[in-house]
Amino acid sequence: MNMINKDHEGTWENCLNVIKDNISAQAFKTWFTPIIPVKIENSTLTIQVPSHFFYEWLEEHYINLLSRVIKKEIGSEGTLEYSILMESNHKNAIPYTVKLPTQNNNSIRNSPVSIPLNNGEKQIRNPFIIPGLKKINIESNLMPQFTLDNFVEGECNRLARASGYAIANKPGGTAFNPLLIYGGVGLGKTHLANAIGIAIKEKQPNKTVLYVQSEKFAHQFIDAIKNQTTNDFVHFYQMIDVLIIDDVQFFAGKEKTQDVFFSIFNHLHQNGKQIVLTSDKAPVELQGMEQRLLSRFKWGLSADLSVPDLETRIAVLHKKMHGSGIELPKEVVEYLAYSINTNIREIEGALNTLLAQASLNKKAITLELAKQMVDKFVKNTAREVSIEYIQKVVCDYFDLPIEMLKSKTRKREVVQARQISMYFSKKMTKSSLANIGAHCGGKDHATVLHACRTVVNLSETDKQFKVYLEDLEKKLTLQ
């Protein structure tokens, strides 16, 4: 080890001098001036950064530059560790550390695959790398941040997640082969597919696991046709123990790609290999796919990922906060969960946007800041107010527990709040009367219509009631 003996402040100062020459003055001021060197120990320099968002930005935009300067100053074995201040509303922030992640995660890499060759036989071409070696290194292409541990379970995904656990324990040996995970945008299909692959590699490192997007597969096949290496392409995929194809709906209309995948699918399935597929539609809704391929998709299990319910959305936010070392006020978390009800990606995106605004503008994360952020976020995504959010605002306004609103009680104040919730749900959402009634304790559409008429009549005759409606409408429209 060629350790250069310097104090941590001097080492970091030398690093900064190099960094300053390689980025703009504004970027240096924003992203490197706030950093504080903490210690240097065993070739590892620890630096303190103000937030997890700050750390992620450095990792995404300056990882190569940081790696170079650290190795230049400390030596070839030099590494970087971050001490991150726990983001909270409290002045006593708690630092926690994150090691500089390696670019190649060894735990999810495949072992080299030996290919028996006859004399004079050419090597099988790996469509992912330049061909030539008898031992083919097959990168799993799995994304290490997507694990089963950080995939939040809820009613919306319970079947898919449970089947993922079963496959991880016995790939190719369950009735879930193939497993087709389907659902809309941002609901976690790619996350779960990667998580299954990672779990298999952890339990059975000798299994060759490959994650590939369907478009990548199709482009590789086109290249194989051009280069007259179609047999190599097929043989390569037939070597895989666990094949994960993401967004299989992109095979639609590509007849030759479907034909070659049909051949690969059959070989893998007949030899007890595991196949995991994702799609944005259920098998019956996939257009432009050959029937023989669709029928094979139905051999195993088709598990859907639906829009997350309120409890799952709150759990997702808590999981994200815990993983990032962030502490947010309860009312901010609830506000985000109630306001954004489309998919998990948008929920996480809203939280990241809020953290970015708070971190870069040095503002405390308050309900008011969350409202301002969601207001802009909502306009950009053309989101409508949800029934759940309307119920929460109404219940908070009248100081009632939301369970009371959904109960069968006929207390006057509860009935009034329930009717107002129905009125605003009809006015502000595209939900059917039956759906609105179901959210309000299983009422039928006639009850919802009666409630709306009652609210309109009362607003015309009762001044106090009209004030209630005006106040609530302001709150619901974030004015």
Image (cartoon, helix red, strand yellow):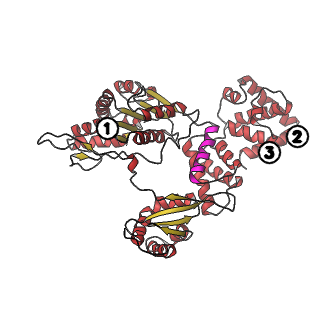
| Magenta-drawn stretch contains 320 | yes
Q: Which residue occupies 80% across, 35% down?
A: 417
At label 1, counting other C-alpha atoms closer than 10 Å, the crowd grade (few under 14, some 14-19, many 20 or more) is many
Task: Using the rendered image of the protein, determine whether residue 456 is visible from the camera's viewpoint.
Answer: no
- Can you identify the residue that label 2 sits on? 463
Where is 345 relative to 425, above or below? below
The magenta segment: 311-327
Disc sitting over residue 240 in the figure: 1
Mark 3 or mark 1, earlier in chain: 1
| Magenta-drawn stretch contains 79 | no
1 and 2 marks in contact (CB < 8 Å): no
Q: Position of residue 158 (x, y in %)?
A: 54, 32
Tell me which corner region of the image, top left, top right, bottom left or bottom right, holds residue 309.
Answer: top right
Mark 2 or mark 3, earlier in chain: 2
Q: Secondary structure at mark 1?
A: loop
Mark 2 vs mark 3: give the one in front: 3
Task: Name the magenta segment's main secondary structure.
Answer: helix
Q: Which residue occupies 80% across, 38% down?
A: 400
- The quadrant the N terminus occupies is bottom left
What's the CA distance linking mark 2 and mark 3?
Answer: 12 Å
Q: Position of residue 203 (x, y in %)?
A: 41, 39
Residue type beneath disc 2: Lys
Mark 1 vs mark 2: give the one in front: 1
Tell me which corner region of the image, top left, top right, bottom left or bottom right, holds residue 272.
Answer: top left
- Can you identify the residue that label 3 sits on? 471
Residue type beneath disc 3: Asp
